[in-house]
Image (tube, grey):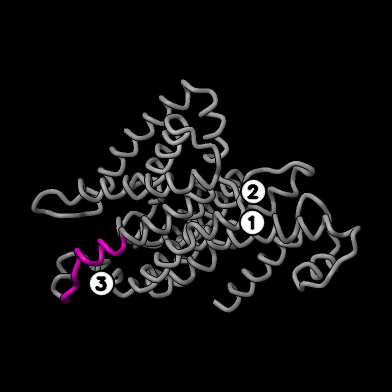
Amino acid sequence: MLAAAAALVAVAALSIAVGTKAIPLGTVWDALDGHPSSPARAEDVRIILDLRLPRTLLGLAAGIAFGLGGALLQALTRNPLADPGILGINAGAAAAVVLAIRVLGVGSLTGYIWFAFAGAAGAFTLVYLLGTRGRAGASPERLALAGAAIGAALLAVVNAVALVDVTTFDRYRLWMVGSLAGRDLPVLYGVLPFLAVGVLLALGLGPSLNVIALGEDTARALGANLHRTRVLAALAITLLCGGATAAVGPVAFVGLAVPHIARSLVGPDQRWLLPYSLVLAPILLLLADIAGRVVVRPGELQAGLITAFLGAPVFLAVILRRRIVPL
């Protein structure tokens, strides 16, 4: 854990220091230390403080949210291949963004995030209500099926609206690809309270999720409140994945791959798996963002594109070397 935390600090520092424009390390340090700089370096200081620092902080917050949300989602559904899209979270956010652009004419990123978060929360609420109908109550299979059905319906709405209206499609695709670029501190401030509550809920659910992993009958025999645990886990997933998706778009593979990397290190114990996912996920997301800045200089590749290239080989390596550790 200490090594992972040190790696996270190093990657965050690298994210501030490295970009499409080469800036001397002395200038980077002066900008962060608050020392006055010469007029010749004022532009470099502005890039660091106004662009790279907010981008790094948002990458830290979104990475933590995707990692914890993915780990919770896999534990809740007992599906080792679950990601935020399986319960309709991404589809709900996407549908809300498209409708906000097409119907309400929303054109700013700060406007998108509230609609995206509301769409993610609303879609997951509907999925949970459908998945808990009947005497049997909620189960991983029912939640997954309800999420697939709602997600398919919402994505049909997204495609119908986006493909008909070229302007809507152009604005929507910039959000959909998943990126840390172009986001400023107000975007982070807007979702930070939701992410903070989600993190606290997630970290407190470790022991309860361990009991549920033993099976529903065993969990009930041990006195576990399955309904309360599922509701709290669902709320944490909505806050984490909904808030992060609203802020940076549906970044692929972070929430899916990182819990498996953590599970290969510490096993299935959620009391350790969740904190490790919290630390490892922002490392992956920030590394992807850094790679996107330098591989096609002076242009950039979006972080959502890079995470697939970085996350997929790591995920396959974990599967081939150790197989998927049982949940």
Mark 3 or mark 2, whichever is nearer to me: 2
Confirm or deny contact between disc 1 and disc 2 (CB under 8 A).
yes
20 vs 196, left or right, is right
Of 59 and 306, nearer the camera is: 59
Mark 2, secondary structure of its residue:
loop
Q: Main secondary structure of the magenta part?
A: helix
Separation (CA) of disc 1 from disc 2:
7 Å
The label on residue 211 is: 3
Mark 1 or mark 3, whichever is nearer to me: 1
Question: x, y percentage for residue 128?
Answer: 24, 50
Magenta span of residues? 222-233
* Residue 45 covered by magenta stretch: no
Of 165 and 137, nearer the camera is: 165
Quarter occupied by the C terminus: bottom left
First reached walking from the N terminus: tag 1 or tag 3: 1
Q: Residue at x 76, y 62 (%)?
A: 17
Separation (CA) of disc 1 from disc 3:
38 Å
- Per the image, the residue denoted by label 1 is 55
> Could you say which quadrant of the image residue 136 lies in?
bottom left
- Per the image, the residue denoted by label 2 is 181
Q: Residues within 10 Å of mark 3 (few under 14, many from 20)?
A: some
Amino acid on which the number 2 mark rests in the picture:
Ala
Amino acid on which the number 1 mark rests in the picture:
Arg
The label on residue 118 is: none
Q: Residue at x 52, y 28 (%)?
A: 169
First reached walking from the N terminus: tag 1 or tag 2: 1
Question: x, y percentage for residue 304?
Answer: 57, 46
Amino acid on which the number 3 mark rests in the picture:
Val
First reached walking from the N terminus: tag 3 or tag 2: 2
Quarter occupied by the N terminus: bottom right
Mark 3, secondary structure of its residue:
helix
Question: x, y percentage for residue 251?
Answer: 52, 48
